[in-house]
Image (spheres, grey):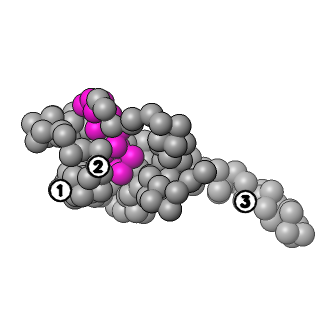
Amino acid sequence: MIKVSDVTTYLKCPRMCYFTSKGHDLFSDISGAYIERLILKELARTYENAFHNDDRRSFLDNELKKISDEIRVIYRNELEKVDDATLEKSIADVSPFIETISSNLLRMISIHVNSFRTNRFFVLINLGFRAVRTGC
């Protein structure tokens, strides 16, 4: 049975809600890797906007800066016993991933465009149009 007070925990992660209802203490040992995952999860929420942005790298850098400013508010309970040095180290450890994330988003754009070009012929046929495949 989930209590009303567990709604925010459920929205963060349904598994967290399940384990706390079973009596487990989820926040006993917060490691740097756990903080990195929290930061990456928050950064992943901005991928759609980054996908549509021309300068993905700087967009993601700005989002990481915003997240680093807001992370203590977002995860108040989880990070209350974490010192600033550990948090700063986790943010610094995530920073090198920005370039990889940016290039992967760029690759997804090219896959999406190529997929559209390949499937355009089939979409036209499925809509009932007669089409001759061109080199586009």
Query: What's the magenta bit mostly, secondary-structure-wise?
Result: helix
**Quarter of the view holding residue 29:** top left
- In the image, is 46 to the left or to the right of 59? right
Which residue is depicted at the point 31% across and 32% down? 28
Q: Is residue 33 magenta?
A: yes
Q: Magenta stretch? A: 30-43
Q: Are marks 3 and 1 in contact (CB under 8 Å)?
A: no
Q: In front: mark 1 or mark 2?
A: 2
First of labels 1, 2 by sequence position = 1
Q: In front: mark 3 or mark 1?
A: 1
Residue hosting label 3: 120
Residue kind at label 1, given as amino acid type: Asp
Residue hosting label 2: 77
Residue kind at label 3, given as amino acid type: Arg
Q: Is residue 41 magenta?
A: yes
Image coordinates of residue 104 in percent, x first then y, are 43, 42
Q: Is residue 114 in sight in this rendering?
A: yes
Describe the element under mark 3 as helix, strand or loop.
Answer: helix
Image coordinates of residue 108 in percent, x first then y, are 50, 47
First of labels 3, 2 by sequence position = 2
* Location of residue 107 with respect to 10 vertically, above or below: above
First of labels 3, 1 by sequence position = 1
Q: Which numbered marker is on residue 69?
A: 1
Task: Between residue 98 and residue 8, name the one nearer to us.
Answer: 8
Q: Residues within 10 Å of mark 1 (few under 14, many from 20)?
A: few
